[in-house]
Amino acid sequence: MLFRCKALFGFTLAALLGAAGAHAAEIELDTVKGIEIGKPGGRIIVAALGEPKTFNPISANETSSTDILAHIYDGLLGYNPEKKVIEPALAASWEHSEDYLTWTFHLRRGVQWNDGAPFTADDVIFSASVIYDEKIINPARSFLEVKGERFKFIKKDDRTVEVRLPAVFGPFERAIATAVTVIPKHKLEADWKAGRFAEALNIDTPPKDVVGTGPFMIGSYLSGERVVLVRNPHYWRQDEKGQRLPYLDEIVFLNVPDLDAMDVAFEAGKTDVHDPLPPDKFKRFKDGEQKGNYTVHDLGGDLGESHFWFNQNTGSNPDTGKPYVPPHKLAWFTNRKFRIAVSHCVNREGIARNVFRGRAQPLYSPISPADKVWHNPDIPRFEYDLDKAKALLDELQYIDRNGDGIREDPQGRKIEFLFITNRENDIRERMGAILQESFQQVGIDGRMKLVDFNTLVTAIADSFDYEACLLGLTGSDNPLNGLNVFRSSARTHSWFPNQKTPATEWEAKVDQLIEQYLATPELPDQVKIWHEIQRLYGENQPMAWLVNPNVYVAVRNKFGNMRPQVIRPRALWNREEIFVK
């Protein structure tokens, strides 16, 4: 169970301050320009829905973990969501050959891990080896291949890494910024060689063994209550006055059971950031700005999305030999007409109106309309129409054969299924209730089951012990970040992940289009390819997309350099710059 083991681990920042050894004077610090000069000290407290599932940045694939790990680990390159540019990170500079097939990264001089060990090219080579290890399930690998072939990471010397590509890879820099999280060889190589890497950084790992180069590190973790990140004294950025960043001493992630508790914690002054602020509660929190000394930031339409899907995994449980999905239900779920009928049951306008108080728009695409560059507005729309849903079900001979109000298939089996969603999110619970009602109206017994978030993640990503799911994806302003969803072989290909070969012709076509995109250097041509991918997704409805809500974040006015962005971690993307005024 999620809260089975409550254990407090910790160490103090003071114990580490003396460890900034002789290398510190030699470090090639990155100077952050154009920010308000802050003062060191203080903390920021953020409410977190659910606990981290892991402290392993390679295998983490859920926001309860990644929202924390983003502050602990760095990559070779970074992405600035405010300026929308790739920036230097652990690589201070880089260049490419004329044919774009060889890229050379020059690592920042003198960088140390938060335990004081030196960072070198060996760590980059080790990280790539782990990412490419087939025995380790991770979402990053799908970003680092072109035409089915991997990149070659080569150490030239301690501060130089060369990456050789088998073919031109259009979004290469974004892929490196997205997928290459650098992990410490000196801490993790032994576990990796012993086949224990997946367990090496679980939530019971002592904080001192969670070693990164990011601005913060784990100070303490109390299961069911909080994760406290403390300032990394070895961090490699400074402000224009030469003050070592980050300014804050601590980021505290306070565990709350659900969105209502998140509301209460913020209004009571127990937290400093309310993210996400539910759109249906916008007026309530907007009216309280002056009294609560905070600002509600309107970040526009969400780049993420919510969707409903059926488990179409054709495999079997290796322990029991039983199919993940009963064969008769798998026949329903893999039938395109059935999925379209279900999509016609989605009352998107009703969800936008009743759940989000009008602060959301109907969604029919896997890429948000908030993404003006990549979104295809012309894909098929299976709008809310219960008569069309009934007609399609009739066509499939799914009819009510015994007069009990529930349809049966031609073999007399009730059209019934459970769909899971996470209990911590009452917005999804209310969306699920609307779906449930529509299913009932067309004669489908589709019932919602609420589970803990990490239980849900285990079901959809590991055990595959579920029938249908209502969930969301965080989204990005570049579809490259969605390759771990769109590729048939990807881990987050929700309805049937990790396919050995594409299960359908249309998925095979998407895989081919993705390879075209990766080998296409010009943006207009890339956009055309992604419009076609969205069309295929729209026609086949592997997911029924629900709504695109507006994004709001409330933050106390006591913080400087607070510039929330729509991409996660929204309020804390520039965590090293934030300070208490």
Image (cartoon, rainbow, N blue to C red):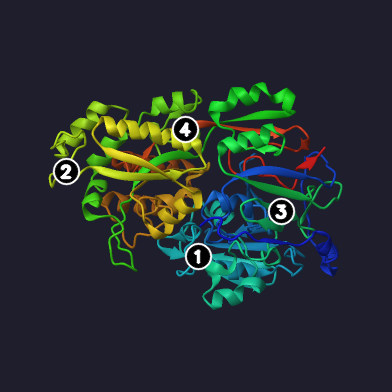
- Tag of residue 229: 3
Q: Nearer the viewer, mark 2 or mark 4?
A: 2
Q: Amino acid at mark 2?
A: Asp
Q: Mark 2 and mark 4: span between their CA atoms?
A: 34 Å
Three-letter code for the amino acid on which mark 3 is drawn: Leu
Q: Earlier in the sequence, mark 2 or mark 1?
A: 1
User: Percent from the top left, x then y, of residue 214?
Assistant: 70, 56
Amino acid, disc 1: Phe
Q: Amino acid at mark 4?
A: Asn
In this view, 453 is above or below 126 = above
Can residue 24 be seen here? yes
Res 548 label = 4
- Residues packed near mark 2 inside 10 Å, few (<14), some (14 to 19) or many (20 plus): some
Give the residue at mark 1.
Answer: 151
Task: Give the number of the mark in front: 3 or 1.
Answer: 3
Give neighbour class at mark 1: few <14, some 14-19, many 20+ (Cα, 10 Å): some
Q: Nearer the viewer, mark 1 or mark 4?
A: 4
* Nearest-to-viewer mark from 4 and 3: 3
The picture places residue 168, in percent across and down from the top left corner, at: 47, 57
Marking on residue 409: 2
Mark 1 vs 4: CB contact within 8 A: no
